[in-house]
Amino acid sequence: QVQLAESGGGLVQAGGSLRLSCEGSRKVRVNNHMAWYRQVPGKQREFVARITPGGGTDYADSVNGRFTISRDNAKNMVYLQMNSLKVEDTAVYYCWAGWGVVNYWGQGTQVTVSS
């Protein structure tokens, strides 16, 4: 059963924008620790952004100032607004949820930025 479902990926030109969405299931509520990670083939999955239950946010240096993570608890959704996209942002983006020793990953959505 899918606990986190990402959407919104696609192909965009450098300098463009995309908004990724992550919908939690009945079991996974997004008012916990939520984060976005990304991975390119042959490399380790890397942290992109996170949001705490209290609404605090944190970003990787490579995306700080360009990406914004947000959450809508009523819709059980987390978003990643990505602006000023660069070719090096190309990756599969994954949504993550965690609390205590429990954590869940989504199946990922592909983002491709062309030059």
Image (cartoon, grey):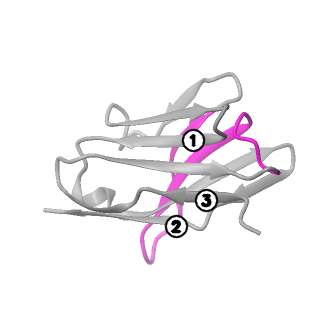
Which amino acid type corresponds to the residue marked 1 in the rendered image? Val
Residue 5 - label: 3
Mark 3 and mark 2 lie on one chain; the one further toward the N terminus is 3
Q: Is residue 46 visible?
A: no
Q: Is residue 71 left or right of residue 10?
A: right
Q: Are marks 3 and 2 in contact (CB under 8 Å)?
A: no
As for residue 40 lying within the magenta part, the answer is yes
As for residue 47 lying within the magenta part, the answer is yes
Mark 1 and mark 3 lie on one chain; the one further toward the N terminus is 3
Residue 32 - label: none
Which residue is labeled 2 in the image? 44
Image spot of residue 30 (x, y percent): 69, 40
Q: Residue at coordinates 67% horizontally, 40% vertically from top-left?
A: 76
Which amino acid type corresponds to the residue marked 2 in the rendered image? Gln
- 43 over 16 or under it: above or below: below
Label 1: how many residues lie within 10 Å, few (<14), some (14-19) or many (20+)? Answer: many
**Viewer-nearest residue: 73 or 70:** 73
- 37 over 10 or under it: above or below: above
Q: Can you tell which of label 3 and label 2 is closer to the viewer?
A: 3
Which amino acid type corresponds to the residue marked 3 in the rendered image? Ala
Residue 78 - label: 1
Distance from disc 1 to disc 3, alpha carbons, whole Å, reads: 10 Å
